């Protein structure tokens, strides 16, 4: 059986060294009526510089279209693939998952499309694709792969802070906060990607340093009695990233962490001053 693994550009695999033959389905960015392709015609460093040049910079995003997916799947079929396994960012954050499901139905006579909603984003999302590729290379069945990914889905999260909440609230990707929007603009909130794939405000702090310490506390709580993998995520504020990195090292002893810049599509929603961690827990151990 010839199977192709694919994922969306929000997986951040463009910025992670790996040897897996994984296709990336690229979401688009709209800036002043001009369209850019995430990770291809718009790189993260180029994108975050735009925030510095334009204080009221408000880019938008455009999900992959059904038509694009139909063309992509038909191309895979012509290349001899019988199946394609696509991991996507959370369906609560984008319509991409539903677009792929719809496209898959339209090409069902040519190729078998399996679409997996990771309920997350960033490199946590990318980890699903890497694991799927590894297991398929070992000869595992789709059912076995899905079972493994379901465990990861129940045991990963993202804690982060951002100084710019305007976009997250405006586009509805941050739940339950519209009633105190004005007050939120004056705080440094701690946000979490939750099990349902939505982003929720879990704590409010008055400074970036206090926000960093709050994230440290959340990391300790989430990883208690677990082995885990952790990576640092960041946007366009190197000073904030460096401060966070130092605290991770002094408070938790975490050195030489994998550092993943957030793709421009994610930056459209969290701004250029976001930092955080993605955590993937391993099976629980006994003390």
Image (spheres, rainbow, N blue to C red):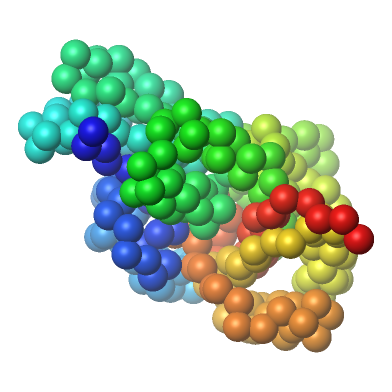
User: Which residue is at the far front?
Assistant: 139
Asked if 150 appears above or below 55 in the picture, the reply is: above
Q: Residue at x 69, y 54 (%)?
A: 282
Q: Residue at x 18, y 34 (%)?
A: 81
Nearest the camera: 123 or 179? 123
Side of 278 relative to 27 (left or right): right
Nearest the camera: 277 or 223? 223
Side of 177 relative to 40 (left or right): right
Please state the horizontal and vertical placement of residue 104, each as a whole percent of the image. Answer: 30, 21
Quadrant of residue 154 within the rendered picture: top right
Q: Residue at x 21, y 23 (%)?
A: 111
Please state the horizontal and vertical placement of residue 83, each as a whole percent of the image. Answer: 27, 30
Q: Is residue 261 visible?
A: yes
Nearest the camera: 48 or 109? 109
Please state the horizontal and vertical placement of residue 55, each as a whole percent of the image. Answer: 52, 66
Quadrant of the rendering where the N terminus is positioned:
top left
Q: Residue at x 38, y 22 (%)?
A: 101
Side of 159 relative to 264 (left or right): right
Q: Is residue 204 visible?
A: no
User: Which residue is at the far right?
Assistant: 287
Please state the horizontal and vertical placement of residue 136, each as a whole percent of the image. Answer: 37, 43
Quadrant of the rendering where the C terminus is positioned:
bottom right
Quadrant of residue 6 within the rendered picture: top left
């Amino acid at each position: 059986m010839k199977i192709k693994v694919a994922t969306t550009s929000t997986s951040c695999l463009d910025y992670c060294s790996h040897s897996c033959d994984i296709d990336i389905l690229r979401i688009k960015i709209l800036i002043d009526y001009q369209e850019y392709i995430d990770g291809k015609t718009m790189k993260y460093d180029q994108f975050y510089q735009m925030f510095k040049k334009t204080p009221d910079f408000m880019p938008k995003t455009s999900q992959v279209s059904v038509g694009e997916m139909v063309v992509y799947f038909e191309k895979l079929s012509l290349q001899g693939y019988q199946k394609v396994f696509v991991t996507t960012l959370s369906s609560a954050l984008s319509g991409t998952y539903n677009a792929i499901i719809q496209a898959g139905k339209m090409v069902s006579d040519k190729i078998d499309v399996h679409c997996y909603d990771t309920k997350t984003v960033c490199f946590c999302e990318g980890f699903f694709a890497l694991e799927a590729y590894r297991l398929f290379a070992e000869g595992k069945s789709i059912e076995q792969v899905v079972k493994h990914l379901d465990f990861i889905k129940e045991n990963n999260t993202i804690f982060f802070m951002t100084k710019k909440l305007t976009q997250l609230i405006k586009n509805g990707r941050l739940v339950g906060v519209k009633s105190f929007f004005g007050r939120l603009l004056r705080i440094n909130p701690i946000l979490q990607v939750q099990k349902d794939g939505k982003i929720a405000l879990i704590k409010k702090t008055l400074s970036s340093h206090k926000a960093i310490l709050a994230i440290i506390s959340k990391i300790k709580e989430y990883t208690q009695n677990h082995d885990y993998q952790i990576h640092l995520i960041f946007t366009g504020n190197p000073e904030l990233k460096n401060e966070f990195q130092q605290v991770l090292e002094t408070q938790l002893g975490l050195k030489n962490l994998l550092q993943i810049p957030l793709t421009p599509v994610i930056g459209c929603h969290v701004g250029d001053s976001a930092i955080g961690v993605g955590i993937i827990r391993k099976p629980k151990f006994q003390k």
